[in-house]
Amino acid sequence: MGINLPEGISPELMGVRVARELTPGQTANLGVGIGFHAVDFVASGVVLHAEHGVFGYGPLVDNLDDEPEAEVSCTVFRQPVRLAPGAFIVDIATSFGLLRAGRIEVGVVGAYELDARGRVASWKGNDHLFGGIGGAVEVIRFSKRLIVVMHHFRPDGKSRIVSQTRLPLTSSRAADLIITDCGVLRPTMTDRLELLEIAPGIDPVELRDSTDADVYWMTEPSVMGY
Amino acid sequence: MPDADVVIQNALLLDRPAVVMIGGWSGCGIPTKLIRILAKVVTDHPGTRLEVVHVGADREIDSLFATGRVTRFITSFALGSENTRHFTAWSRSLSAAVDLVTQGTLAERIRAAAFGIGPFYLETEQSSPFDSGKEVRQFGNKLFVLESPLKGDLSLISASAADEYNNLHYYGSSMNFNPLMAAASAVTVAEVRRRLTSPLPPSGVHTPGIVISKVVASGH
């Protein structure tokens, strides 16, 4: 946790905050990391897209129905989920095709690092024993609106938000909103991030000073609400 | 029709590494019985070499990396975990080669091979690390990268139900890569949970039997 900073909010509460960004009628991809916690908190009418071809999943269930082939549930990232009325299944080419064609309104992705322009480094590159990229590039490039949800700091206390990432950038597309365990930020036209909200119990000045990229605010950040 | 192990073995009789596509996605719709059979066939035949195509280093395919026959892994997620000891060890060996492909591109390359499409363009961006070595071209005000179809010698897929015509149906999230890989290889073996005694309704056929070489029942 950032040097001298108290704990930020939990991944579950970050998921709650993500869910607040989604409105009924929108199709959204939550990804597999922290963003996936939003599954239990999204408003009814939000269509959740899982990259392997499921549209309309959620909420999580404890186990699959007795009839595992009943089309009321399936698994997403090895977790059983219920399918909402109106859900549909497509193959993986159609799934990414709909994404590529701009049909997914909101993409939520994680990041190892984020730079001052809101660009994401979400894979460790080919130096790290080949690496994993999954569908992140397509989600980042083609979602109409991009939300990054990430821890603000590494376990060793170093800032994950940096003026220049060490890891390779996944894409040059910048996030529209960044939700961390310490606050909510957005990129601006300059190489500075605007702090919009602050996690309870954290001093925005200390957060700004612990972040390795320029952070500022026009008005005092409000407390992250959920 | 020979048993599955013979069908698989014959599909691998090539003078080059065989491209083997394995359907499924993170525990959904993975042909675990066929993977076991494949592992045994290649273990028993020291001359075989495999280039494995699968979405990621899933635990269900980990055993393949212990056979000593995999020379290349074509995938979107080549990161091991505590559930993939063999893959992790394999990835550290000098002879291991990985083609890391973004998942949407992987899906579309397989689909192109399945349906007779040649090289094709996908939208990209300037200086993408995933485009190195490939032709990048501007059309209008957008940048595109030239991708090639990915064809297999053998596809091992999973489906929920097959009728006697080898027409297949997939329930739920088990569909994913299976219909695409089913049609993208010279030989396809399908592992199914249910063998139907009457035909699937025509509009309920997800994968036509004409691309399926053999069907086996799942389980032991």
Image (tube, grey):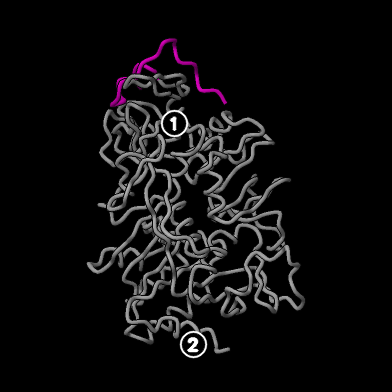
What chain is tagged by disc 2? B
Please determine whether, in this image, residue A186 is positioned above or below residue B102: above
Considering depth in this image, is B220 or A143 the residue closer to the camera?
A: A143
Q: Please, which residue is most extreme toward the front here? A: B140
- Is-magenta flag for residue A223? yes
Q: Which residue is disc 1 drawn over?
A: A181
Q: Residue B107 in the image: x percent, y percent?
A: 48, 57
Q: Please, which residue is most extreme toward the left here? A: B94
Cβ atoms at labels 1 and 2 below 8 Å apart: no
Question: Marks 1 and 2: which is nearer the front?
Answer: 2
Q: Which residues are magenta?
A: A203-226
Q: Residue A184 in the image: x percent, y percent?
A: 45, 25
Res. B159 image quadrant: bottom right
Label annotation for residue B6: 2
**Amino acid tagged 1:** Asp
Q: Name the side, left or right, on which B175 lies relative to A148.
A: right
Res. B55 image quadrant: bottom left
- Is-magenta flag for residue A206? yes
Residue at coordinates 39% horizontally, 84% vertically from top-left?
A: B13
The reply to whether residue A102 is in sight is: yes
Q: Residue A35 in the image: x percent, y percent?
A: 51, 39
Determine whether the residue tagged by mark 1 lies in a helix, strand or loop: loop
**Amino acid tagged 2:** Val
User: What count of labels does the image hold?
Assistant: 2
Quadrant location of the N terminus of chain B in the rendered image: bottom right
